[in-house]
Image (cartoon, rainbow, N blue to C red):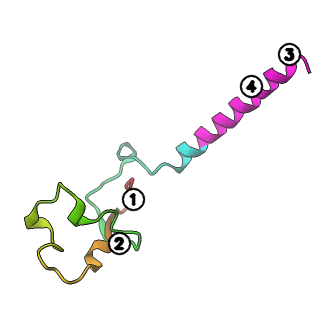
């Protein structure tokens, strides 16, 4: 095996790393630089929402915490903003 085998392993590992990075870059959402207008879009239902419990969030002031203020339904928490021509990162 000699010196050739470690060199071969290094080449294979480098190739795997390059392919992995390329696949991650291809799966990234479109960025604002690509012409995304975040103000044009609509609210879409997403059953994976909400991403957090509003009562546990220290940044929501009590005046804006609908659940803590007695709002009985929670369906409004299942919507997210979807721009028309691009994806927002989670």
* Side (left or right) of 80 relative to 24: left
Mark 2 sits on what residue? 44
Q: CA distance from mark 2 to mark 4?
A: 46 Å
Q: Is residue 52 magenta?
A: no
Mark 1 sits on what residue? 85
The location of residue 68, given as percent across then percent down, is 15, 72
What is the quadrant of residue 9 in the picture?
top right
Residue found at the far front of this picture: 56
* Side (left or right) of 90 relative to 77: right
Q: Upstream in the sequence, badge 2 or badge 4?
A: 4
Judging from the image, what secondary structure is the residue with disc 2 in? strand
Q: CA distance from mark 3 to mark 2?
A: 58 Å
Residue at the image point whose x is 29% and y is 55% from the top: 38
Mark 4 sits on what residue? 10
- Camera-side residue of 35 and 90: 90
Determine which of the numbered discs, if any, sits on residue 3 in the image. 3
Mark in front: 1 vs 2: 2
- Residues rendered magenta in the picture: 1-22
Judging from the image, what secondary structure is the residue with disc 1 in? loop
Instruction: In the rendered view, tell whether residue 89 sits above or below residue 83.
Output: above
Judging from the image, what secondary structure is the residue with disc 4 in? helix
Q: Are marks 4 and 1 in contact (CB under 8 Å)?
A: no
Judging from the image, what secondary structure is the residue with disc 3 in? loop
């Amino acid at each position: 095996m000699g010196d050739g085998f470690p060199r071969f392993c290094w080449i294979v590992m480098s190739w795997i790393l390059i392919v992995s990075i390329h696949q991650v870059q291809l799966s990234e959402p479109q960025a604002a630089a690509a012409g995304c207008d975040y103000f044009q879009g609509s609210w879409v239902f997403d059953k994976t929402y909400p991403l957090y419990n509003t009562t546990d969030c220290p940044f929501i002031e009590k005046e804006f915490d609908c659940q803590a203020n007695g709002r009985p339904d929670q369906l409004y928490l299942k919507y997210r903003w979807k721009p028309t021509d691009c994806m927002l990162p989670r």
